[in-house]
Image (spheres, rainbow, N blue to C red):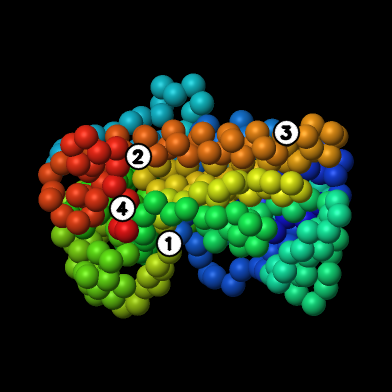
């Protein structure tokens, strides 16, 4: 079996398949970035990590506990949820590059083989796939697409990617000392006319700060310019209050990433399945990207194993579950954005349906 992509979705699928005794090759081009926008991982992911046998790698660090979430959404007052009474306990603020490499290392230790390179072509032959990977050809009975929101393999085998918006995230990792020393170990979201801001403390004392809006709004504000991004950051209330700095660092790395909602249609077919963002990518406000990556990786591995054992409808049922989860997410997203009614700006009006209308495409 070949898995295209070595992120959390691909690594979880590889781990699950190896536990079932499958021969697994993970094709991953590798990563050169020095940091990756972090993410708060909810405690709900703990059972998934435990089932994969890697929970101890997260709890051992350098990842740090996340004790709750705060938000100014639908009003100016900051409210929060505390995990102290949650039976699952705290989540985690992740060092994303470390987290991703830990999962892939675990997959290799479990017996998955890794190949460096990108998928160049995928061709269906009788009962197997012929895959060109860099300069070599690999034959596999099944292929799992973990290439991210581009869904590169799924599109090659006939799936369509449906995008619901044109959301982008503009993120910076501020150096140690940028935030006040007494900042709580919680995530914070603050809505503003152009969209919303997110911040969280990261392992090592750095701070993630991220603006989320539609691509055309970001272009209109020129948010890709560090000086403009910083000016808009200083116009916030609660995110700004966490920072000690009032002037931008001499230089900081501003990353721009696609953050749109999308789904592969279908998310699986004969001999293949999509996982993680390749199957369904969600708005960062949902804070479920990594959890979904882990869950779909495990679920797709189970479906592939069942198909190999003769359960003919297992991949179809996996695709149906992905579609159902995506539908539920869209409804929840509508409710979430519907709470904020303070601004009549393009970002927000796109997310507020006309009376009697079920929805409008955001950023279309």
Tag 4, which secondary structure? loop
> Tag 3, which secondary structure?
loop
Q: Residues within 10 Å of mark 3 (few under 14, many from 20)?
A: few
- Is 46 drawn above or below residue 155 in the view shown? above
Q: Residue at x 77, y 70 (%)?
A: 132
Disc marking residue 362: 4
Whether pointer 1 and pointer 3 mark residues with C-beta atoms closer than 8 Å, the reply is no
Which numbered disc flags the more N-terminal residue, 3 or 2? 3
Q: Residue placed at 28% from the left, 66% from the top?
A: 216
The residue that appears at 36% across and 34% down in the rendered structure is: 332
What residue is pinned by disc 3?
Answer: 313
**4 or 1: tag closer to the N-terminus:** 1
Residue under label 1: 258
Q: CA distance from mark 4 to mark 1?
A: 14 Å
**Real-space Cα distance between discs 4 and 2?**
12 Å
In this rendering, the count of numbered labels is: 4
Q: Quadrant of the C terminus?
A: bottom left
The quarter of the picture where residue 305 lies is: top right
Q: Secondary structure at mark 1?
A: strand
Q: Place residue 230 in its image quadrant.
A: bottom left
Horizontal side of 78 relative to 29 (left or right) equals: left
Numbered disc 2: secondary structure: helix
Query: At 41% from the left edge and 22% from the top edge, which residue is drawn?
Result: 85
On residue 333, the disc is 2
């Amino acid at each position: 079996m070949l898995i295209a992509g070595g992120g959390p979705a691909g690594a979880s699928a590889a781990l699950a398949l190896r536990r079932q005794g499958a021969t697994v090759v993970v094709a991953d081009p590798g990563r050169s970035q020095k940091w990756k926008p972090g993410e708060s991982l909810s405690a709900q992911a703990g059972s998934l990590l435990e089932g994969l046998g890697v929970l101890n790698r997260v709890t051992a660090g350098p990842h740090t506990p996340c004790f709750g979430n705060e938000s100014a959404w639908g009003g100016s007052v900051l409210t929060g949820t505390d995990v102290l009474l949650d039976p699952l306990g705290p989540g985690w603020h992740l060092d994303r590059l470390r987290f991703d490499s830990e999962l892939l290392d675990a997959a290799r230790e479990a017996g998955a083989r890794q190949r460096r390179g990108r998928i160049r072509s995928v061709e269906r032959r009788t009962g197997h796939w012929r895959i060109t990977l860099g300069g070599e050809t690999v034959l596999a009975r099944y292929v799992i697409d973990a290439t991210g929101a581009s869904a590169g393999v799924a599109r090659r085998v006939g799936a369509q990617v449906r995008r619901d918006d044109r959301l982008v995230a503009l993120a910076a990792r501020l150096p140690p000392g940028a935030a006040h020393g007494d900042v709580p170990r919680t995530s914070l979201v603050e809505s503003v006319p152009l969209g919303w801001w997110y911040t969280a403390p990261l392992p090592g004392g750095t701070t993630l700060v991220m603006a989320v809006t539609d691509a055309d709004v970001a272009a209109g504000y020129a948010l890709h310019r560090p000086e403009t991004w910083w000016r808009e950051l200083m116009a916030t209330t609660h995110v700004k209050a966490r920072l000690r700095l009032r002037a931008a660092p001499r230089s900081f790395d501003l990353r721009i990433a696609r953050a749109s909602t999308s789904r592969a249609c279908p998310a699986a077919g004969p001999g293949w399945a999509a996982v993680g963002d390749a199957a369904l990518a969600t708005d960062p406000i949902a804070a479920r990207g990594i959890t979904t990556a882990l869950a779909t990786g495990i679920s797709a591995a189970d479906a592939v194993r069942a198909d190999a054992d003769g359960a003919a409808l297992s991949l179809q049922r996996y695709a149906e579950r992905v579609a159902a989860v995506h539908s539920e997410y869209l409804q929840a997203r509508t409710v979430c954005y519907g709470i904020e009614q303070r601004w009549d700006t393009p970002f927000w009006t796109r997310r507020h349906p006309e009376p009697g209308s079920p929805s409008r495409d955001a950023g279309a």
